[in-house]
Image: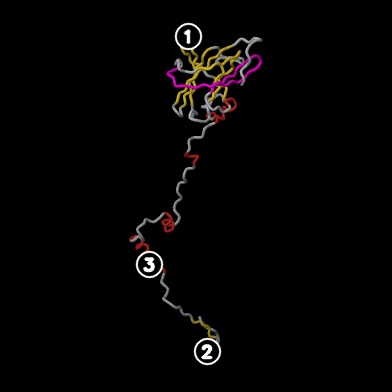
Amino acid sequence: MIEDRDPIRTPEPFRFEARVGHADRPPLAIAVILVVFVLVAIAKPWGDEAPSTAGVAATLGPLRPATPAPTAAKLSAAPTTAVDGAAAVADFCLEPGSWRTATIETWRDQTVRVWRAVSPVPATGPEDPAIPTVPAVGSSIPAIGYCAPGEGSDRPIGPVDVDAWRLGVGGATRVDLRPVTPGGAESAFGGLYRPPGSGPAASWSDGIIVFRHADEGTGVERWFGIEIRGVIESSTASPAPSS
């Protein structure tokens, strides 16, 4: 742009404009060129490799958001509930490293908790002679049960079914188990059961109670027995076992 302020030629300045180069292309011409360019690019892709996802996104704009990948929690199995976990029976099992029978035994003027090692086995039924049996001895036996290891290859997974039978002269009779711990429900890692009788002073009567621990998680059935032996207390009675 040139301004000429010569008063002789004109009292007011005037403007002279010139554009160097080609004349402006109208919008229609530009649109046609872009369409031709895109068609050529589609007909003859550049290079032999397929375009990456990033390239497609850059060309076509933002892609539709993909469904988010499931988190690790969603991929894992359903969380173990408190009743299925070792924590539910930790107060009386104390995290054993192997299988134990657990009993509450009354001796003289004290009630103690007793754990005894046991090695459950597969069996054909409650009368199978291969089932190992451990004692529970006291003037009163308010509760009997078991504790399972929380670690190792012998650890149960759960859920489980726990059944019991009393052995007698006429064979095995099913026992109605009444859970004391944990919270009136079954746990894969342990349980204490009150006797069939009622009242706070009820005691398991003498005899052999056979347990079946059926683990649905592993498909393993474990059998073991507890032989209850009542004693008559006297001043010369042997001392109570340590808890």
Q: Nearer the viewer, mark 2 or mark 3?
A: 3
Which of these two is toward me, 82 or 16? Answer: 82
- The amino acid type of the residue labelled 1 equals Val
**Residue bearing mark 1:** 169
> What amino acid is found at the position of numbered circle 2 in the picture?
Arg
Mark 2–mark 3 Cα distance, whole angstroms, equals 46 Å
Question: Comparing marks 1 and 3, which lies closer to the viewer?
Answer: 1
Instruction: Give the structural element (helix, strand or loop) at label 3.
Output: helix
Q: Quadrant of residue 130?
A: top left
Residue placed under numbered mark 2 in the picture: 9
Q: Amino acid at mark 3?
A: Ile
Residue in the picture at 44% in, 21% down: 122
Question: Do the CB atoms of the residues marked 1 and 2 lie less than 8 Å apart?
Answer: no
- On the image, the x and y values in percent for residue 204 come to 56, 14
User: Which residue appears at 57% of the width and 21% of the height?
Assistant: 115
Instruction: Pick whichever, 77 or 208, lies toward us.
Output: 208
Q: Is residue 109 magenta?
A: yes
Callout 1: 10 Å neighbours few (<14), some, many (20+)?
A: few
Q: Is residue 202 visible?
A: no
Q: Nearer the viewer, residue 13 or 239?
A: 239
The quadrant of the picture occupied by the C terminus is top right
Q: Is residue 60 magenta?
A: no
Rounded to the nearest whole Å, what is the CA distance between mark 1 and mark 3?
103 Å
* Earlier residue among tags 2 and 3: 2
Estimate the spatial distance between the alpha carbons at disc 1 and disc 2, rounded to whole Å.
141 Å
For marks 1 and 2 on the same chain, the one whose residue lies earlier in the sequence = 2
Identify the disc placed on residue 33: 3
Question: Over which residues does the magenta segment extend?
Answer: 100-125
